Amino acid sequence: MNVRLHVKDSVIEKISVVEPPSFFVKNVGIELAGVGVVSVDIAFGGNFFAMVDSRELGIRVEMKNIGRLIELGLKIRDEVNGLKETIHPENPYIRGGMCLAAQHRHLTFRRSPSIFHNFY
């Protein structure tokens, strides 16, 4: 990540942030106990993300479901991390370590919580 401060008369007028490029890596299917086969898109955006459509999990992305989303998210993360290791195509030092983004797409809105750990 590159950050640039734009200063005029000792006052920061704006900040520019350049993030690393984001890109799709691959799609995999995993067997999730109690759910079945789930399609997982793996993408990179500063970290590797395993993304699923929450409808495949049979759950809506809502606060009342946060405990179950975390539970499923950690299982998905562990399953995906147990597959062949994912390595960044340009920097082999960046590898694996998925977090989960469970998405729910509906017409004009989208919710996408990211799950890194088992707390909230």
Image (tube, rainbow, N blue to C red):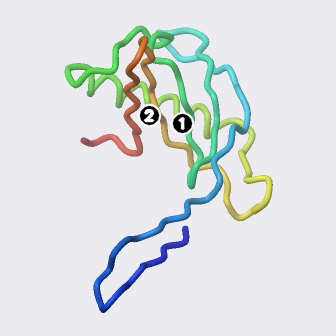
Mark 2 residue type: Leu
User: In the drawing, does residue 72 fall left or right of residue 91?
Assistant: left
Q: Quadrant of the N terminus?
A: bottom right
Q: Where residue 93 appears, x then y in whole percent?
A: 71, 64
Q: Is residue 2 above or below residue 8?
A: above
Q: Nearer the viewer, residue 72 or 45?
A: 45
Q: Where residue 23 appears, x then y in whole percent?
A: 68, 43
Asked if the residue under mark 1 is in contact with the one under mark 2, i.e. CB atoms within 8 Å, the reply is yes
Q: Is residue 10 above or below residue 61?
A: below
User: In the drawing, does residue 114 fall left or right of residue 39?
Assistant: left
Q: Where residue 37 appears, x then y in whole percent?
A: 61, 12
Mark 1 residue type: Asp
- Label 1, on which residue? 78
- Label 2, on which residue? 74
Q: Which label was assigned to residue 31?
A: none
* Residue drawn at (54%, 36%) of the image: 78
Q: Nearer the viewer, residue 44 or 50?
A: 44
User: Which residue in the rendered view is the most extreme toward the left?
Assistant: 64
**Classed neighbour count for the residue bearing mark 2: other residues with Cα under 10 Å, few (<14), some (14–19), many (≥20):** some
User: Which residue in the rendered view is the most extreme toward the bottom?
Assistant: 10
Q: Where residue 2 appears, x then y in whole percent?
A: 54, 72
Q: Is residue 18 above or below residue 109?
A: below
For numbered disc 2, what is the local secondary structure? helix
